[in-house]
Amino acid sequence: MTQLLKIRFFQLKRDLGFLFFVIIALASCISFLVFNHQKQVGFYAAGIVVYLFYNFHKNRRDIAFVAKHLEKAQSQILAGYQLFLLPVSIPCLFTNYWYCFFILHLFVCIVPFLNIKSKYSFKFSFITSFFKDDYIFISGVRRNLVLLIILFLLALALSPLKLFPLVALFLFNNVMFSFYEANESVQMLQASQQTPKQLMASLLNSGVKKMVLINFPILLINSIFNPDLWMFNMYFFVYNVLILASVIALKYESYQFKTSSSNHQIKLIVMILGLFIPYLFPLAIIFYAQSRAGAIKNLSHYLDVVN
Amino acid sequence: MLLIKDLSFSYNEEPVLKDMNISFETNRIHGIVGLNGSGKTTFFNVLAGFLALDNGTILFNNAEVLKKDIAYIDAESFFYPKLTAAEFLSVFPKTNSNFNETELAHIFNLPLDEFIENYSTGMKKKLLIISQLKQDKQLFIFDEPFNGLDIESNKSLQYIIELLNKKGKTIFIASHIIEPLFGLCHQIHHLKNKNFAKSYLPNEYELLNNEVFGEFDEHLKNTLSKSL
């Protein structure tokens, strides 16, 4: 019954080491500060926490393995989620949002039982025409088109309001970041005919252009209606670019030509939390710098270092 | 000439290829044979530059092998999700001016507007081959190219390999199915005990079967006769 928790423990020890305890402590402190906030920030925070768990669950590559090889798989997954939720949920008990503790645990209880996969595959040929040979976006948009449209329209509709549009935009960007979880074959990687540095730069450049296209109109409207928020909106965009750069770096840091996907959810969740917890910002920068150096080194096995 | 000098590679401190010294003539078709686990795929991965060497050098026409010059058709490849075959092929630059995507897709019987995940293993292999033929590469590495292919595609692939060779390409093929190699290869090299044990010319191919599989066959027969 505890096999999965043991695996998770080894993963955390390998990926984060002592940093794990620092992050837990920070997450608890921030959770307390967020839920203790005067305004209704607690509800959004609770929503985002549940979404992060859902996103983690949706993108897990070990579900089939767990289901096949571990006893009471869903219970083990559920136990893990409930345990990892505690550093965020316990601080709620000491705030006015004490009931969020139960809401969080209740919603996270449902997550292991959610397995939404479309039975139908639509080609949407306009996606190919729009993104040309950008296979990351062709594939990603095709897999998430409905969700992306809903989130964009929601962000646009709510754009004059405070905070609401940013939550929708954050979720939109998060779906976009998930595009980079699939690995391309080494042949596709080499087709770019770029050096590792050029490849990283071109992917970031392409991703940022799309982020500007989606984020800027909403942030602009939001800043016009809420002039006091323009600085925060700028920070929001810059931080999202940092997450995008890190997602790309994390992918290629661990890229292996025989593996179809990379999974750095733990590091990524820490980075995403930095958007709401400014204290984690330096950690996000460190993660990015580390991952970028690692990615360039790793990619030199698959791409020529000079043109 | 493709020259391999003092090449060693180990995986988790376990030597897989050790002190390898061999030269391969360019513009030739080279077969690589060896029993399961002899290191054929590792040798190809090393040749393609995917694995960091413990020691040694690989020179192609007296220069370092560039990854952009290598076409690698691996035994088991994976494909990006939710892409059609046409979209997949569009990712590759058309540096081979004679390449005709439609004709090749027709020869291999591939519906290019289908999602790749709906393809069979053999179809995926054929798609990968087409993607590599689109580019003008100097060195072609085929790891178990005949596995999973139907009889017509098998024949087509043999013609393609011959044609590539006529265009001056250097080709390496590893195959468990040894017979197609006899008709295709200018030389077949036997990989054994972490090194190349012997290279065979076409007039020596009769010996090859016996020398590669003889010991294994005898051991297998003895073991089976005691076990059944």
Image (cartoon, rainbow, N blue to C red):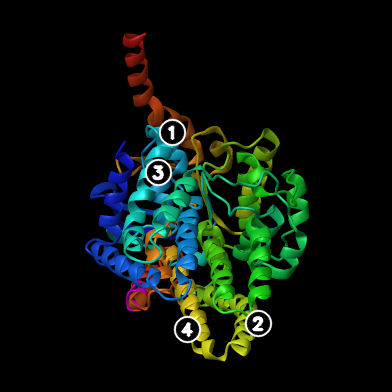
Left/right of residue B125 with respect to residue A67 in the rendered view: right
Looking at the rendered structure, the secondary structure element under dot 4 is helix
Label 3 and label 2: CA atoms lie apart by 40 Å
Pointers 4 and 2 within a single chain? yes
* Amino acid type, mark 1: Lys
Task: Judge depth for marks 1 and 2 and give the one in front.
Answer: 2
From the viewer's perspective, tell me whether residue A129 is left or right of residue B40: right
Respond whether the residues carrying marks 1 and 3 are from the same subunit.
yes
Instruction: Give the spatial CA distance, label 4 vs label 3.
Output: 35 Å
Label 2: how many Cα within 10 Å (few below 14, some 14–19, many 20+): few
Whether labels 4 and 3 share one chain: yes
Chain under disc 2: A
Residue A160 included in the magenta stretch of the image: no
User: Label 3 amino acid?
Assistant: Ile
Q: Chain of mark 3?
A: A
Q: Which residue is mark 1?
A: A68
Disc 3 element? helix
Q: Earlier in the sequence, mark 4 or mark 3?
A: 3
